[in-house]
Amino acid sequence: MASMSGGKAVVEALRLAGVTHVWGVIGTAMLEVFDALYDTDDIKYVGVRHEQNAVHMADGYSRVRGRGGVVLIGQPGPGATNTVTGLAEARLAFSPVVALAGATVSSQVDRDTFQEVDQQALFSAITKRTTTVNTARRIPEYIQEAFRVAESGRRGPVVVNIPGDLLATEIDAEIEPAAAVPGPGPDGASLQRAAEIINGAERPVIVAGAGVKWSRATDQLLALAVRIQAPIVASAGHGDVVPNDHPLYVGQVGPRGNTVATALARDADVIFAVGTRLGYNTTVFSHDNVSADARIVHVDIEPSAVGRHFPATVGIAADAGETLAALLPLVEAGEERSDWTGAAQQRRRELLETRAEQARQITDPLHPATVFGAIQKALPRNAIVTLDTGTCSLHATDTVQTYQPPSLITPLDFGLVGFSHAAGLGAKAAAPDRPVVSLIGDGGFGMSMVELGTALDAGLNTVTVVLNNGCWGAEKAYQRDFFDGRYLGAANTNPAFDQVARAFGIDGVKAESADDITSAIEAGLRSDRPSVVEVAVDPDTITSFRKDSFPNRTKA
Ligand SMILES: Cc1ncc(C[n+]2csc(CCOP(=O)(O)OP(=O)(O)O)c2C)c(N)n1
Ligand SMILES: [Mg+2]
């Protein structure tokens, strides 16, 4: 047994979890942890400017790494409350973020003492699990358990509150690697029934989601799709589940996807949904987007998600990759189905041609479609793209193509503005050799651009493209479409973002044309510094997405 401070034990537990980076803001409660990190070469501490962004960075990191990302909340109270938005986002994205939060010292708890807030209660509502360490010697156990919970089953954020006094306590710590938690395997009878349904399909479609990415099962998915000759559509925000130029890929389904993919889910006789909960942004929980007559084979690692919004003919609560691998030998080679799969491929080609046509149009200011085309030209095949929540980013979700899973990082169902830049920094830390390009609106970048300083300090050289339409576009569109253009709070006055970037000491460029955009991104990707490319986009192209939110939706 080794004797060490509670703070040192935290760092030893993090080393065993294999994390390369931790993200946070320094604070009194955690100084023993910082002191232990001072001597640790294999974990890089990234000091950020706002705790919310630390969570987005850890989230982006975890999605690319495929395992946990860590936040250190140095300060109880305000440091902790600043992470709330990030953790709530990570919960709806099912990201394995592990946040270690300094907490009020034990002797002061429940006295309305300095900076006291009930962190156990606060975080419980927005995490997969929240715990509070009660004895210093159990610090390693709590941290290891946090990783096991965050990284197993349906992933999710876990907070461990650690009262500051425990970190200063000397403990005898024996820290062993935590055993991996195997996912539940698919059962044979359900697999047989699933195969029978798939084999009997005339109009099959595969709806693939994040579960396939978490289990790194793109190859198994493609093998199955090729064998049964079924088109693949992605759930919302998970278009990177397969290389986007695979001949069977048709794009993202649902209101944020494209009409070709959505029509497949609406017209199919068999839907094989794998690694997806068929959540709101994918289906709006409505048969407008999912055939009411289809037989559904639903695979998700979370039992309560299987068949929840649409009854499953066969439900399998299991890991996506294991299920795909087990199903492959049971399914029969599909016929060509020129009137279904072939027709979908033809419509997909037409859609891409229309988009290419739109990308060639030159307007002043530029249409987002032109901008996306110019961005695409600059993206190498191994690029990672991060997106935000504005109208431009929502259009980019299905339009900008990526090829190497995982490669698309979006705010998913929490739909928050101000995510993309920070998430890109996390992604870059997890994959330093891959180019990272972050798209974000002027509103979102205004919320988060303070992290340019973090990017510079930590050497996280991403390229951020600011799509500037001078407004909170996605909300302005609702005022246009549903409130007769009575705009209030929709306009956004911005600084020159390229100059802001230069003031931070990084590369900042204003791109005036499509060619400018492509070459500015290419230069940014070659640069040994982070960079910002500001692009003026046409404010008249904004779109309202959530038409269902308004009673008078027929007006749109
Ligand atoms: C944190 C947060 N605040 C407010 C909103 C509501 N909202 C959704 S989209 C949007 C506009 C975003 O503007 P911008 O980043 O400029 O992107 P644009 O829509 O103009 O492309 C707003 C305010 C939100 N989703 N998240
Ligand atoms: Mg905007």
Image (spheres, helix red, strand yellow):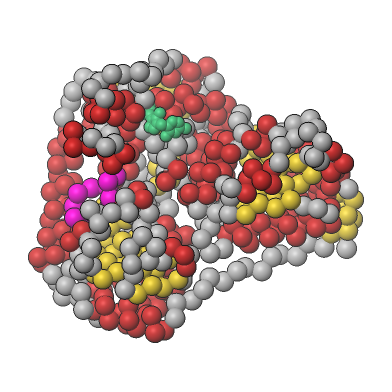
Q: Is residue 220 above or below residue 413?
A: below
Q: Residue at x 13, y 70 (%)?
A: 337
Q: Residue at x 23, y 31 (%)?
A: 370
Q: Judge left or right: residue 243 versus residue 410.
A: left
**Image spot of residue 16 (x, y percent):** 70, 58
Report the residue that reaches farthest toward the front: 551
* 437 inside magenta stretch: no
Q: Quadrant of residue 271?
A: bottom left
**Closest to the observer, 335 or 523:** 335
Residue 212 in sight in this render? no
Figure label count = 0
**Image spot of residue 245 (x, y percent):** 26, 54
**Image spot of residue 404 (x, y percent):** 38, 53
Q: Judge left or right: residue 447 versus residue 329.
A: right
Q: Residue at x 82, y 63 (%)?
A: 174
Q: Residue at x 36, y 50 (%)?
A: 280
Residue 270 in sight in this render? yes
Q: Is residue 425 above or below residue 329?
A: above
Specify start and end residues of the magenta stretch as a single range.
253-263
Report the residue that reaches farthest toward the left: 339
